[in-house]
Image: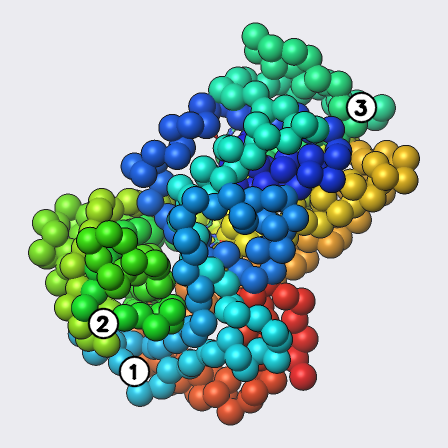
């Protein structure tokens, strides 16, 4: 495994938990990634992804409590007039499934702490970081040469190095990229009233604004994460504001249902763009997570897609190893690609389409959007399909 990020690290733990001998290499030192200043994101982990984290032994190692998302509210608005006449309300009890929530909010740092600890606790797993790795692949197998470390002979190399995957480039796998010219502003707020475990996605002409419920912290009883998408030049101005100006801009977009808001902690910026690899495999090589695809964070699904890749590849590899078959055989890799690529492409198209559809103030498009929102309201089958998608389940309209 090359890359011990959330997707590569989780797959390595999942394979090793099943007894599959695994080596994971990351070029960055892992402990600094646990520092609160390293990554300000909090991930909405879908119910489907929780199954993988459980099987990898990671869920119970999360050091911080997770906050359930029991309701999702989607609205179409304008700044200063956030509560659109039309909005969608999704309740996890309407999914027809026995589940406590659509998903759980997990801080990136918390996931990192769990992964780092577990990478060194499994007998079948060896973690080498920081280290540079070079890879030679041929039909019979592959060799990973680790600078200053051992050479590892293996039957499958997994590229999990994120969006700029060197292994993908080395294999000559083309990618399609969609720049958005938008920046994701990530921060946290304390607010006066409880969030009721409700996530809000508020579509504004310059990009979506999401408020995601978080657990209480020592000096604030009611806390939410903010993922606010803006065109990059505006985002730069917002990021440069003082705390009171920043808080005022958040309040204008959020509305007043949570009472007075106060920004807490620092702000992070993430340049946004989508990408998709034309193939997910090559000789003795599989791409997973952001090395294979990157999407707009509009629906909080990027990492969840990576987890679904990891779950599909883990299942195929564990089955092959247990039955004495080759875990890097071309037909296994082809099956992995067939299982994941169409679903990921569909999600990329859906998130890209949503961003384009809602990031406009054109009155005709606004009217069409409102018709669409009204239609979803009236069609319980369609509504259920959206809810199952948010939970990371297979979807069908009934
Ligand atoms: C603002 C924002 C909010 C988001 N919110 C959500 C959300 O709520 N839910 C969700 O599901 N997704 C979300 N995402 C998407 C999510 O962050 C990514 O999909 C996820 O981080 C991808 O994980 P990964 O392990 O594939 O890659 P990465 O996180 O990029 O990790 C790659 C790892 O590989 C290592 N590496 C890189 N190059 C090399 C090399 N040459 N050799 C060895 N190692 C290397 C790196 O050090 C790193 O550890 C969000 C994204 C953004 C920008």
The residue indicated by pointer 1 is 84
Instruction: Measure how far apart labels 3 and 2 are at the Cα level.
Output: 58 Å
Instruction: Measure how far apart labels 3 and 1 are at the Cα level.
Output: 57 Å
Instruction: Measure how far apart labels 2 and 1 are at the Cα level.
Output: 21 Å
Along the viewing direction, whichever of 327 and 120 lies nearer the viewer: 120
Mark 3 residue CB less than 8 A from any atom of ligand 1? no
Q: Secondary structure at mark 2?
A: loop
The residue indicated by pointer 2 is 193
Marks 3 & 2, CB-CB < 8 Å contact:
no
Q: In the visual, does 82 lie left or right of 128?
A: left
Q: Position of residue 216 (x, y in %)?
A: 29, 58
Task: Tell me the quarter of the picture where residue 347 sits.
Answer: bottom right
Q: Position of residue 185 (x, y in %)?
A: 29, 51
Residue 106 makes an appearance in the image: yes
Task: Tell me the quarter of the picture where residue 269 sits.
Answer: top left
Q: Position of residue 18 (x, y in %)?
A: 74, 40
Q: Position of residue 360 (x, y in %)?
A: 33, 70
User: In the picture shown, does residue 202 fall above or below 317?
Assistant: below
Q: Quadrant of the C terminus?
A: bottom right
Hey, which residue is sitting farthest top in the picture?
Answer: 148
Q: In the visual, does 135 lie left or right of 213?
A: right
Q: Which tag is nearer the camera, tag 3 or tag 2?
A: 2
Q: Which tag is nearer the camera, tag 2 or tag 1?
A: 2
| Residue that appears at 65% across and 11% down | 150
Q: In the visual, does 288 lie left or right of 21?
A: left
Q: Secondary structure at mark 1?
A: loop
Marks 3 & 1, CB-CB < 8 Å contact:
no
Q: Sequence-wise, which precedes: disc 2 or disc 1?
A: 1
User: Which numbered marker is on residue 141?
Assistant: 3
Q: Quadrant of the N terminus?
A: top right
Along the viewing direction, whichever of 122 and 70 lies nearer the viewer: 122
């Amino acid at each position: 495994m090359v890359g011990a990020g959330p997707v590569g690290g989780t797959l390595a733990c999942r394979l090793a938990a099943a007894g599959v001998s695994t080596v994971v290499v990351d070029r960055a030192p892992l402990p600094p990634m646990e520092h609160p200043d390293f990554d300000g994101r909090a991930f909405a982990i879908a119910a489907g992804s929780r199954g993988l984290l459980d099987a990898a032994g990671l869920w119970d190692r999360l050091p911080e409590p997770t906050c359930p998302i029991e309701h999702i509210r989607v609205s179409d608005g304008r700044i200063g007039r956030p509560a659109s006449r039309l909005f969608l309300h999704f309740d996890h009890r309407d999914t027809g499934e026995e589940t406590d929530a659509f998903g759980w909010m997990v801080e990136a740092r918390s996931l990192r702490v769990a992964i780092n600890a577990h990478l060194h606790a499994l007998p079948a797993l060896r973690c080498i970081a920081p280290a540079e790795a070079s890879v030679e692949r041929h039909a019979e197998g592959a060799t990973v040469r680790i600078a200053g470390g051992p050479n590892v002979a293996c039957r499958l190399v997994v590229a999990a190095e994120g969006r700029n995957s060197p292994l993908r480039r080395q294999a000559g796998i083309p990618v399609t990229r969609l720049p958005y010219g938008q920046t994701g502003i990530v921060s946290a707020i304390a607010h006066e009233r409880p969030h009721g475990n409700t996530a809000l996605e508020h579509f504004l002409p310059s990009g979506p604004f999401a408020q995601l419920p978080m657990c209480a912290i020592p000096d604030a009883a009611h806390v939410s994460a903010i993922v606010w998408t803006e065109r990059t030049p505006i985002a730069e101005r917002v990021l440069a504001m003082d705390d009171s100006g920043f808080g005022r801009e958040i309040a204008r977009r959020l509305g007043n249902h949570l009472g007075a808001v106060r920004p807490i902690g620092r702000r992070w910026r993430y340049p946004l763009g989508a990408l998709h690899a034309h193939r997910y495999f090559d000789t003795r090589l599989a791409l997973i997570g952001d090395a294979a695809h990157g999407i707009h964070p509009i629906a909080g699904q990027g990492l969840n897609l990576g987890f679904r890749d990891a779950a599909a590849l883990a299942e195929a590899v564990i089955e092959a190893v247990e039955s004495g078959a080759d875990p890097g055989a071309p037909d296994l890799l082809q099956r992995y690609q067939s299982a994941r690529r169409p679903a990921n492409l569909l999600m990329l198209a859906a998130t890209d389409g949503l961003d384009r559809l809602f990031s406009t103030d054109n009155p005709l498009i606004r009217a069409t959007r409102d018709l669409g929102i009204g239609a979803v309201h009236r069609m319980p089958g369609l509504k259920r399909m959206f809810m199952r998608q948010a939970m990371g389940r297979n979807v069908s309209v009934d």
